[in-house]
Every structure is written in structure tokens, then in C-alpha cells.
């Protein structure tokens, strides 16, 4: 393992040196931190854990982005090396590497490879996503100023950020020579946006139901020799509106509609709002998210999945390079990731909605929580800082045994706390 790590570092150094010689631009960052975690659960001892608050990753995240543009500025290459969280998924992954070209007076844009295009990614605080790309090709067209539309076709999807964005599923790497999904199994993505400068931005991206996720198991290999089936992805629509008219005001509303192919029976809706206003050195903000569900009645019982609402009121004050901040959170219908079996995470979205259905019994009511986080950030340079903070969570339910443990099976609440230090270095 040590030799593999050394080899990986040497290889990265050689690639970096060679690319520098070709005047390729680099940027990236490394983020990690350490927290002391306490929980009032009798089953959980106090412990230390490494976690990156800024990157929202267990352990650490390392990224190195590279880009090259030709002299005419109409073609180039983009790529990213990344390592994070789980070393058993490889010391380094390649989340994206693709070539791109513009032509016909920049009206058309094409990209091919492992594509990751953020043109339609939301800028809200909670969703922060589009419907995804992967191994394939993208075509974008800008017929008039402000209007941008695109269509992408992808054979394999990137996995989520927590899975290191690799093109695999279940621990098996794809054999590209055998990836020949049926035409209807590929992922088709359609996107569009319109910008009215200094007024608003409106955009949306949609994907069809597909099997572009990688799925390959030992049973498949033994039974079929080789079998590509694909991990099914649901049909999804993500859209966003940004209000740009008022200086120093951030106003964003985004929505995600998932499982559109069976929306009336299993649909999920997330609505996310981000508001912030900067007054000289003082910034005040309100983040919100709502979770709604469609669920079909089963077993002749009235089944209602309770909606959830998450509110995050925050404020920060800049004193030269020092920025104290306070976050207050109330989540009706959710729980913290710190106090439960959720990998013990404490980033600023470290809350999870709980889909608890109500069939008339008290034990199916949704839990709630309060959270308080004072922190202070010491900015060393642009994108480089040290943050010290403390996150206190009070999870509670309005029924017996909501958070019961061996000392009190009827306990209705859970207290958790983490004192942490977070470091990010951008280059």
C-alpha cells in the first residue's frame, strides 16, 4: 500500500510538471479538519473524528484542476484529479477529463469525454446540483445573447461526490470495451437557461429515466461471464431562479422534482431558498428548504408522508481578516447527521429529512431539531482559512422512545455537540 501511494504521488508530480511545461493552468484545494464529538446516547462514547467542513467530506478532500485553451481560444481540455474520504476507492480518481470546442462565432459548443459541465448547476444552499453528466458528449447552442440550451448523451454516470465521483458502482471498475447499453438505457439530458443581465437568471435541466449508473457484481460475472445492466436513475428535473437586480443581495430559489416517471406514487420534491444581504461588514442570511412527498396508499391504510421544513438563520461580521459567524437552525421533520447513525457529519447542511408516514399512530410522527453553531473564520488568503467552531444539536420527538437507549427506552430527545477546527488551502 505504501508503494502504491508513493507511485501515485510520483506519477501526479510527473504529470503536473509535464503539463506546466505546456502552459496549462492549475488550481485546486485541500480541506480537512478535526472534531471532538459528544452525544447523550448511552450507546455512543465521545470520540475524535477527521472531517472537512468546507468540502463536506469525511477525512479530507484533495483536488487538482487543470485546463488548457489554445491560442485562438476556441478549443481546450479540462480535467480534475481528486482524492477523498475512502482510500479503498483509489488514491486518486478522475472525476472529469474532456475536450471542448466552440465554432460558428461561438454559437455552438461541444464537449466529449468524462464531462462535468456546471452551466446549469444551482447556486442555492441545499440542492447545489444539476441532473448530472458522465462519460459521453454534450452540445450547447447560444442562438441569441443570454439564451443557452444544451443536450447531452452519457453511457455511464459519475457517482456522487461522497463516492469520489468515480465511474463505478459497488466497487467494480468498468470495462469500457463491454459497455454497450441499449439506446433507451443511456442518459439523455436536456438543459436551458436565460440570463437578463443585472435582472435575473432562469435555468433548468432534465434527464430521462436511464440505466447509465454502473452496475456489475460478482454474481453477474460468474453467471454471464460479463453482464452490463446499468444502475437505474430516475427521471429528474432541477430548476433555479436568481434575482440579480439589487446590489449586495443574494436571492435564489431552486427546486428538484425527482422520480418523475412515477411521480404521483413515489415523487419527491425539494424546494430550496437562499437569501443574504451584505451591509458593509455585516452579512445577514436566511436559508430554507422544504421536502414534500407523493406516496400511494397501501394496504387500505391512509398513508401520508409528512412534509418537512428546514430553516437556517445566520449572520457574520468581518473584522479585517477575521469573520465571526452564528448559525441558528430549526428543522421540523428532520434530524441531525451528528447525533444519529449518519456518518457523524457537521457541515452546514448536516441535516437529513426523515420520511415518516402517519397512519394514525403516535409512533410514526416526524422528529424535529434545534441547532446552534457559533464559529470564527481566520482568512489567510483568498480561499485559504482556518475555521474554529462548535455545533450543538438538540434532536427531539413528540412521542415516547423517539431517541430511547439502554438507560431510558422512553427518551424523547438527543443532545449532540462537536467542537471542531477546519482548514482549507486553495492554490
Image: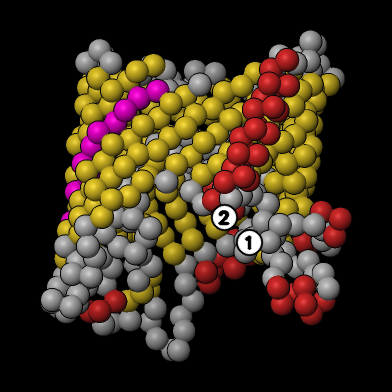
Classify 66 as above or below 412: above
129 on left or right of 124:
right
Residue 144 visible in the shown view: no
- Residue at position x 28%, y 50% in the image: 48
Residue 390 included in the magenta stretch of the image: yes
Marks 2 and 1: in contact by CB < 8 Å?
A: yes
Numbered label attached to residue 171: 1
> What residue is shown at x 51% (from left), y 52% (from top)?
86
Please tell me in which quadrant of the rendered image residue 133 appears.
Answer: top right
Q: Residue 216's image quarter?
A: bottom right
Q: Nearer the viewer, residue 219 or 297?
A: 219
Question: What number is the disc on residue 88?
Answer: 2
Q: Quadrant of residue 7?
A: top right
User: Residue reaching furthest top?
Assistant: 71
Query: Which circle, 1 or 2, is nearer the viewer?
Result: 2
Q: Position of residue 147 (x, y in %)?
A: 67, 27
Q: Could you tell whether 313 is left or right of 56 in the image?
A: left
Secondary element at tag 1: loop
* Drawn side of residue 301 relative to residue 175, left or right: left
Magenta part of the protein: which range? 384-399
**Disc 1 to disc 2, C-alpha distance:** 9 Å
Q: Is residue 74 left or right of residue 163?
A: right
Q: Residue 97: where, in percent of width, then height?
A: 72, 36
Amino acid at each position: 500500500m505504501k508503494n502504491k501511494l508513493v507511485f501515485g504521488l510520483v506519477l501526479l508530480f510527473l504529470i503536473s510538471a509535464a503539463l506546466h511545461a505546456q502552459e496549462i493552468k492549475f488550481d485546486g484545494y485541500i480541506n480537512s479538519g478535526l472534531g471532538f464529538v459528544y452525544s447523550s446516547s448511552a450507546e455512543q462514547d465521545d470520540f475524535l473524528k477527521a472531517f472537512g467542513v468546507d468540502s463536506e467530506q469525511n477525512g479530507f478532500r484533495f483536488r487538482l484542476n487543470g485546463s488548457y485553451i489554445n491560442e485562438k481560444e476556441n478549443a481546450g481540455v479540462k480535467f480534475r484529479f481528486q482524492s477523498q474520504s475512502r482510500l479503498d476507492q483509489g488514491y486518486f480518481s478522475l472525476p472529469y477529463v474532456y475536450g471542448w470546442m466552440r465554432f460558428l462565432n461561438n454559437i455552438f459548443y461541444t464537449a466529449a469525454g468524462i464531462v462535468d459541465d456546471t452551466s446549469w448547476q444551482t447556486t442555492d444552499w441545499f440542492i447545489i446540483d444539476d441532473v448530472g453528466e458522465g462519460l459521453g458528449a454534450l452540445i450547447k447552442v447560444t442562438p441569441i445573447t443570454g439564451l443557452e440550451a444544451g443536450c447531452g448523451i452519457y453511457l455511464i454516470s459519475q457517482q456522487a461526490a461522497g463516492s469520489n465521483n468515480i465511474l463505478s458502482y459497488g466497487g467494480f471498475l468498468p470495462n469500457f470495451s463491454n459497455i454497450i447499453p441499449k439506446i433507451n438505457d443511456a442518459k439523455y439530458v436536456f438543459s436551458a437557461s436565460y440570463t437578463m443581465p443585472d435582472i435575473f437568471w432562469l435555468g433548468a435541466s432534465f434527464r430521462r429515466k436511464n440505466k447509465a449508473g454502473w452496475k456489475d457484481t460478482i454474481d453477474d460475472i460468474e453467471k454471464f461471464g460479463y453482464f452490463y445492466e446499468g444502475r437505474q436513475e430516475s427521471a429528474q428535473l432541477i430548476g433555479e431562479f436568481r434575482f440579480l437586480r439589487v446590489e449586495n443581495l443574494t436571492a435564489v430559489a431552486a427546486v428538484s422534482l425527482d422520480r418523475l416517471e412515477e411521480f404521483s406514487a413515489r415523487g419527491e420534491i425539494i424546494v430550496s431558498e437562499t437569501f443574504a444581504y451584505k451591509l458593509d461588514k455585516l452579512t445577514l442570511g436566511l436559508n430554507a428548504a422544504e421536502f414534500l412527498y407523493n406516496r400511494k396508499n397501501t394496504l387500505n391504510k391512509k398513508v401520508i408522508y409528512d412534509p418537512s421544513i428546514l430553516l437556517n438563520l445566520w449572520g457574520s461580521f468581518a473584522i479585517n481578516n477575521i469573520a465571526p459567524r452564528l448559525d441558528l437552525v430549526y428543522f421540523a421533520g428532520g434530524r441531525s447527521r451528528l447525533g444519529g447513525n449518519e456518518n457523524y457529519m457537521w457541515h452546514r447542511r448536516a441535516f437529513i429529512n426523515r420520511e415518516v408516514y402517519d397512519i394514525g399512530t403516535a409512533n410514526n410522527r416526524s422528529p424535529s431539531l434545534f441547532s446552534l453553531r457559533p464559529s470564527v473564520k481566520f482568512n489567510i488568503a483568498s480561499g485559504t482559512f482556518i475555521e474554529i467552531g462548535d455545533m450543538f444539536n438538540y434532536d427531539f420527538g413528540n412521542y415516547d422512545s423517539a431517541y430511547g437507549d439502554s438507560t431510558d427506552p422512553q427518551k424523547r430527545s438527543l443532545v449532540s455537540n462537536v467542537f471542531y477546527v477546519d482548514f482549507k488551502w486553495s492554490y
